[in-house]
Image: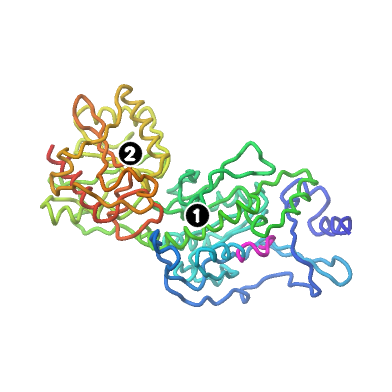
Amino acid sequence: MKILNFILFALIFGNLSTFANEQGWFVGGQEKTKKAPKTSINSAESLNHMPGPPAAPMRQSERKKPPQPDYLIGKVIWGESVTFNTGKDKYKELSDWNLAIKDVETFTQQLSDFGLSYHYAHVNLSTFAYDPQLMPALYFSGVRTIKLTDSQIRQLREYVLKGGMIICDSLYGSPYFYEQCKQLFAKAFPEETWRTIPLDHPIFSTYYDIEEVYFPTDPDRNKPFMEAIYIGSRVGVLCSRYGLGKGLEDDLAVFETLEERGLQPLYYEPEAAKALAANIGGYIVGYAEAGRIEGLPELFGLPDQRRPTDELVFAQIKHNGAWNVHPGAAPSLLNQLQTEAAVKVNLKRVPIDLEKDSLTDFPFLYLTGLDTIAFSDRERDVLKSFLLEGGRVFANNGLGLSTFHQSLVDELKRMFPNGALRDLPPEHDIYHILSSVTSVQYTESTRTSNPDIADKPHLQGFYVNGELALIYSPYDMEAGWLDARFPLMQGLENHSARTLGKNVITYILSH
């Protein structure tokens, strides 16, 4: 029977040599049925989604009772389907989009242990509403080259910007599906780059702390690996190079077939795949509202389109990492500063390219990120000169991740080998200049991870020639300037973040 299936497969796809290319990955483990399934899928098969309330971010103490939409995730129908007779009036279907027929079902089931009950659906893009409040996430699965029209790419972009999340599962670790997904969504978001998700990111810790995993065909790797396109601080598009679907089904037999064909499948074993699914599902729920807020365009009045010399301009350093962490947060804080401290501000953020832009008009530069910073030699020289000449930098650790912290420390060491970040003492003027900040409120996850922090404000400073040149918040302050919550974020709650942020800017302007 294996030989018969092999011949049938070869006849369908051309010749036996096709196993050397992407067709060799096109195998499946679906159950046999008495009735032949349909060989094609049309738009009439897409589901009509019942509207439900938007998924809201979870507080740590409220994880089990968030508002719930009817649907969490839709598996996208794409590609081709092939049906063939396996004998005794039994038929088998292989579909590009559905080689793992139970993956999204199992995906949603993983959340039931945490009191979350959601549905899944099969989605045809030609009739999909592209509304994340009806369907918070879309799931692409496959092994062969996926094709999307320009119109679909534009609509998927808008869906993500409105708060939706896209997950791409390279089901067997096929390079064809993986590389094409990365290319398609790089096209959808040309202003962003694919980033490797840091190991202390909530994707790896929402419910399960996933620090090490075992990859049967890649024993040299023992850390989970996911890539993302960020929209603000949120994962807008998630891509798994290592397959999740067969681990979710707890069916790994197909990988033996692939190895027999001389291919090297890459995949997560069931335990890791299910833990990742729970984390990703919780992340979708937890960051839905934050995604919608950070996806909104920053709107400014006509006066703010200019760059007047008598107003504070919030100049933010662009770098090769995820630099645009919390869109909309700075104008929110500046608006409060203008009202409470009578500081004339321009509400339009100005992105700064250190290699091209003049820094003359800016009293300080803002620097933040989610992962690595790697300045060029030219950027490093410009920033060093800015600090030596009396300019200041206000730095913030987006989401409080360790990767950004270490990267900032490394960059400062390259510019000033003898310098180091120091804790600013409680009596420092920065804590008292506008409001007296003797205590702050941190997020629950921050207090859990750092029990010694209590309610003490924690800023660090970097001195150049005896002057405080860089002020750094190792816990995310900027997230708190927005009216949203970010589960597992290592940072300050909203009121404390705003109060301390206004103090920092006021200090910079008056010293």
- Tell me how far mark 2 sits from mark 1, CA to CA: 26 Å
The disc, 2 or 1, on the residue closer to the chain's N-terminal end is 1
Residue nearest the observer in this picture, 493 or 376: 493
Q: Which residue is mark 1?
A: 237
Q: Is residue 321 magenta?
A: no
**Amino acid type at mark 2:** Asp
* Mark 2 Cα shell of 10 Å, populated few (<14), some (14-19), many (≥20): some
Residue nearest the observer in this picture, 184 or 101: 101
* Mark 1 Cα shell of 10 Å, populated few (<14), some (14-19), many (≥20): many
Q: Is residue 237 left or right of residue 342?
A: right
Q: Which residues are magenta?
A: 98-105
Q: Is residue 59 left or right of residue 466?
A: right
Q: Is residue 100 magenta?
A: yes
Q: Nearer the viewer, mark 2 or mark 1?
A: 1
Query: What is the x, y in percent for residue 54?
Result: 42, 70
Identify the image quadrant of residue 482: bottom left
Query: What is the x, y in percent for residue 364?
Result: 22, 39
Q: What number is the disc on residue 353? A: 2
Secondary structure state at the residue bearing disc 2: loop
Residue nearest the observer in this picture, 247 or 73: 247
Question: With respect to residue 36, does 147 lie above or below?
Answer: above
**Amino acid type at mark 1:** Val
Residue placed furthest toward the left: 342
The residue at 66%/38% (across/down) is 219
Query: What is the x, y in percent for residue 321?
Result: 41, 41
Quadrant (top left, top right, bottom left, bottom right) of the C terminus: top left
The colour scheme used here is: rainbow
The residue at 22%/32% (across/down) is 469
The residue at 84%/70% (across/down) is 90
Q: What number is the disc on residue 71? A: none
The residue at 67%/53% (across/down) is 143
